Image (cartoon, coloured by chain):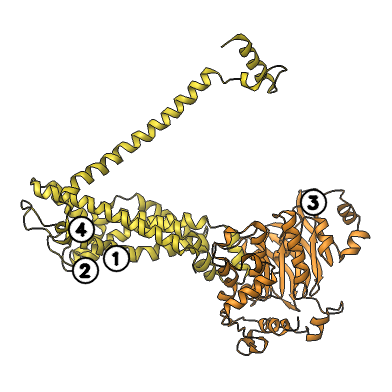
């Protein structure tokens, strides 16, 4: 943790590429100069270390609505995501969970016709502001997807990929080993780093994807149903891993599985589908957001209560 | 078929559930079904055999007739000055084919792949992409002699016959094949891989060059080899652009140049046994070249798969 902080900060400061040697040998040359500085304003060294509730949020979502073409997919979401916590997004199918999580690193705009209204403030700065490069946003906010999606390359090259495209100049072997260790995969693959990543099992592939995401030292890791394609044992390993990773990273996870949300997360957002009777249009809304223990024991909203008690969904 | 079995079949057909006292072994398929099954299997095998007959005959004839004349002398010397004379070979034609196909490949492969990347990753359904796609489709259907005529009027009339003009016509023929085959291969690259790349903060061109193209490489190579084979086998456009020659030359312009197909054409239509024998050997040579290229390209593509 102590040795992690300077590096994270170096990553966040685009001008620090030449001065960032203090935290080790890692030097990221920003190939694309960010037009707007994504600073870490308001996040003090102390605040990061303690993780107190008063600490400013990593993300503040303000009046966020998402449209696919003319269809409203997500309506007027407001929530704050705290640093070094696991925030779970739950809800029935089609309620916009994935849509919401893909707003946090601007992955939605890869879908033709997707449009975002409102603000997503990342350390106080709107990532949708004009002049913010989505590529820069995604370098700070990593993502792990529903199905394990390693590149058809070697295990080593998979982990090194992000560092290479970001112009990493340090010791690649060391970075790969450290990332794989943190993803709890090193011992299983250390003798076969040159082998194809596609030869690994599904659970190993997903941990490789996590290693790949943390190799670029992101600030936040977004996980879109990371365990839904895995068996129970692999799922447990991913969940254990998340608990370890939350020491250093803020994690947002979408999950279908309420038990999983209850087990791993600190805070839970419950999304639900609203239906317009006249046009039968459907969109997702944020029903309730709060500490996981409260959401699952004393939900304020009837719909949340019905959902977490298994009455539907 | 005894009556008990027929009865059992009827009952099982009706319910799909075994009647008491009837075992699965009693429920045989009807003769009609067995017969139809065999007949259809036989028809399919027959179709395969009929398709293979011409291919096998061509290969057999080219190999058996070509191998008689195919020797070291044939590979390393050029045409004698008369068709009547024996000996000599198609070195001049081989050099011409390699130069022209090589140049055409060097031009059409990068351009074709870039066009395909535009179609899949950048243009998607916009008017320019639709235009490129439409003209690629039209171009694959245009008879190659028209391409030769086009290059003849556009270039040969002004600059004379030569390897460059031949290469230009071959490149025009190769381009649409490469564009469409590469496009199909790029479409097959899973969106999840692109998501993974974008999620790591890769820019679009990084995603294209480091993830999309390497993932599609083996398929792209197959399409390129198809185009190379097609170009190496073209005759009509070369008659109008390279013209053909008996001399060994590596000049790119100002001088007509031969190609294997042109030499085969010349040798085959003359009445002398020696010339015809050389044409057979030339056909075998062309076949082997395309075969070797394809194998080499496949091996290279599969090796590069897991490298950066």
Asked if marks 2 and 1 touch (Cβ < 8 Å), the reply is: yes
Residue ID for mark 2: B252
Q: Secondary structure at mark 3?
A: strand
Looking at marks 1 and 4 on the same chain, the residue that comes earlier in the sequence is marked by: 1
Marker count (numbered): 4
Residue ID for mark 4: B259
Q: Position of residue A2 (x, y in %)?
A: 75, 84
User: Who's the residue at 9% across and 49% down the image?
Assistant: B274
What mark, if any, has residue B103 been given in the picture?
A: 1
Q: CA distance from mark 1 to mark 4?
A: 13 Å
Q: CA distance from mark 3 to mark 4?
A: 71 Å
Q: Position of residue B52 (x, y in %)?
A: 33, 38
Q: Secondary structure at mark 4?
A: loop
User: Who's the residue at 50% across and 64% down the image?
Assistant: B306
Q: In the rendered picture, chain B carries what hue?
A: yellow
Image-based side of A232 in relation to A188, left or right? right
Image-based side of A127 in relation to B36, left or right? right
Q: Is residue A237 visible?
A: yes
Residue ID for mark 3: A276
Q: CA distance from mark 3 to mark 2?
A: 71 Å
Output the letter for the chain in orange: A
Position of the N terminus of chain B, as image quadrant, is: top right
Q: Could you tell me which chain the residue with mark 4 belongs to?
A: B
């Amino acid at each position: 943790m102590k040795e992690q902080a300077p590096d994270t900060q170096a990553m966040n400061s685009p001008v620090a590429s030449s001065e960032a040697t203090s935290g080790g040998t890692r030097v990221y040359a920003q190939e694309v100069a960010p037009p707007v500085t994504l600073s870490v304003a308001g996040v003090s060294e102390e605040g990061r270390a303690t993780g107190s509730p008063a600490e400013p949020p990593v993300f503040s979502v303000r009046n966020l609505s998402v449209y696919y073409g003319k269809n409203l997919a997500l309506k007027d979401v407001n929530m704050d995501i705290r640093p070094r916590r696991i925030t779970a997004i739950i809800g029935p199918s089609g309620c916009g969970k994935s849509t919401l999580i893909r707003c946090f690193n601007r992955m939605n705009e890869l879908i033709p016709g997707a449009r975002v209204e409102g603000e997503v403030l990342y350390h106080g700065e709107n990532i949708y502001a004009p002049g913010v490069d989505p590529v820069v946003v995604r370098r700070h906010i990593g993502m792990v997807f529903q199905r394990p999606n390693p590149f058809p390359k070697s295990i080593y090259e998979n982990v090194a990929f992000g560092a290479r495209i970001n112009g990493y100049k340090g010791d690649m072997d060391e970075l790969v080993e450290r990332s794989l260790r943190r993803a709890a995969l090193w011992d299983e693959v250390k003798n076969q780093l040159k082998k194809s990543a596609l030869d690994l099992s599904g659970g190993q592939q997903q941990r490789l994807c996590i290693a790949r995401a943390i190799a670029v030292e992101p600030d936040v890791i977004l996980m879109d149903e990371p365990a839904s394609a895995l068996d129970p044992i692999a799922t447990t390993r991913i969940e254990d891993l998340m608990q370890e990773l939350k020491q250093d990273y803020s994690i947002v996870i979408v999950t279908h599985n309420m038990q999983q949300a209850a087990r791993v997360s600190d805070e839970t957002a419950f999304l639900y589908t609203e239906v317009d009777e006249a046009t039968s249009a459907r969109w997702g809304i944020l029903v309730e957001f709060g500490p996981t223990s409260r959401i699952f024991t004393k939900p304020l909203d009837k719909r949340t209560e019905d959902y977490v008690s298994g009455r539907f969904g | 078929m005894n009556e008990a079995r027929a009865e059992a079949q009827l009952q099982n057909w009706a319910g799909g559930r075994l009647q008491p006292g009837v075992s699965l072994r009693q429920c045989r398929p009807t003769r009609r079904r067995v017969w139809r099954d065999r007949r259809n299997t036989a028809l399919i095998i027959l179709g395969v055999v009929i398709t293979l007959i011409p291919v096998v005959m061509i290969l057999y004839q080219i190999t058996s007739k070509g191998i008689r004349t195919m020797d070291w002398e044939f590979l390393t010397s050029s045409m004698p000055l008369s068709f009547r004379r024996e000996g000599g070979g198609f070195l001049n034609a081989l050099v011409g084919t390699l130069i022209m196909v090589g140049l055409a490949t060097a031009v059409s492969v990068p351009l074709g792949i870039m066009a395909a990347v535009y179609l899949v990753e950048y243009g998607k359904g916009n008017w320019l992409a639709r235009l490129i796609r439409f003209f690629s489709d039209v171009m694959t259907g245009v008879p190659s002699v028209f391409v030769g005529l086009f290059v003849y009027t556009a270039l040969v009339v002004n600059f004379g016959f030569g390897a460059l003009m031949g290469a230009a016509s071959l490149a025009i023929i190769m381009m649409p094949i490469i564009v469409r085959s590469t496009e199909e291969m790029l479409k097959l690259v899973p969106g999840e891989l692109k998501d993974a790349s974008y999620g790591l903060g890769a820019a679009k061109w990084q995603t294209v060059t480091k993830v999309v193209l390497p993932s599609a490489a083996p398929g792209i190579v197959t399409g390129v080899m198809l185009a190379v084979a097609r170009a190496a086998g073209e005759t009509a456009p070369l008659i109008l652009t390279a013209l053909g020659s008996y001399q060994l030359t590596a000049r790119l312009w100002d001088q007509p140049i031969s190609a294997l197909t042109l030499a085969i054409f010349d040798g085959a239509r003359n009445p002398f046994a020696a010339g015809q024998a050389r044409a057979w050997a030339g056909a075998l040579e062309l076949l082997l070249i395309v075969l070797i290229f394809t194998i080499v390209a496949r091996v290279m593509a599969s090796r590069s798969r897991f490298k950066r």
